[in-house]
Amino acid sequence: MTDWDRRYREGEHVRDEPHPLITGFAPKITPGSALDVACGTGRHAIWLARRGWQVTAVDSSRTAIDILGQRASEKGLVVNTVLADLERHEFVIEPESYELIVVCNYLQRDLFPSIRAGTRIAGIVVAIIAMVDSDPNIRPMNPAYLLNPGELRAQFEGWDLIHDVEGKPSGDPSRRATAEVIARRRRPA
């Protein structure tokens, strides 16, 4: 059992609400195929599936995938759940496969090229990822899992940035700074 399996079994993140950036933006686009990267117990996958998206949700935690499958079934929703370790590249994001890719609270730098390639032309990536934060009141985190200023934006150079914000979430000084991007893949010139 992994640390994440244990945390999910103990109820951590099981009742988390979808991120407001996703719930605020996704209704503005026509539902299609969506990928929820490192989906956890499926707060975004279930929310999207309820709104007509065909969702593939990937996570390395069997417990999270089981919880997501049960929650989706109880709601009469279909979510394609995939148990795969993204760091070991057990899941391949096929080129131009998704109208929407969601990455929330997960950083794997070598996955960005696949995320960009896996987004269809005019498709959207919504990413919300923790940043380096010098605030002494914020609990320490492994810097390998934290973005530097400007790093997320740079991953989508050449894309249309619909939303690009860095800083404390909703001005809450007690929370770690995040980088948020909504990027649309441009049509070739």
Image (spheres, grey):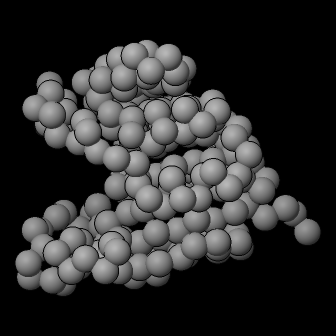
Of residues 157 and 172, the one nearer the viewer is 172
Residue 68 image-quadrant placement: top left
The residue lying at 21 percent from left, 80 percent from top is 173
The relative height of residue 60 versus residue 148 in the rendered view (above or below) is above
Q: Nearer the viewer, residue 47 or 101?
A: 47
Residue 170: image quadrant is bottom left
Q: Is residue 89 left or right of residue 153?
A: left
Residue 161, given in percent of the width and then of the height, sits at 64, 73
Residue at 58 percent of width and 65 percent of height: 182
Q: Position of residue 99 (x, y in %)?
A: 69, 45
User: In this view, which residue lies farthest toward the right?
Assistant: 189
Q: Position of residue 41 (x, y in %)?
A: 33, 33
Query: Would residue 145 be visible to someone looking at this image?
Result: yes
x and y percentages locating residue 31 in the rendered image? 69, 41
Quadrant of the snapshot with the C terminus: bottom right
Question: Residue at coordinates 19% horizontally, 63% vertically from top-left?
Answer: 142
Residue at 25 percent across and 76 percent down: it is 172
Q: Nearer the viewer, residue 100 or 186?
A: 100
Q: Is residue 127 visible?
A: no
Q: Quadrant of residue 3?
A: top left
Left or right of 90, for residue 95:
right
Q: How many dots with numbers? A: 0
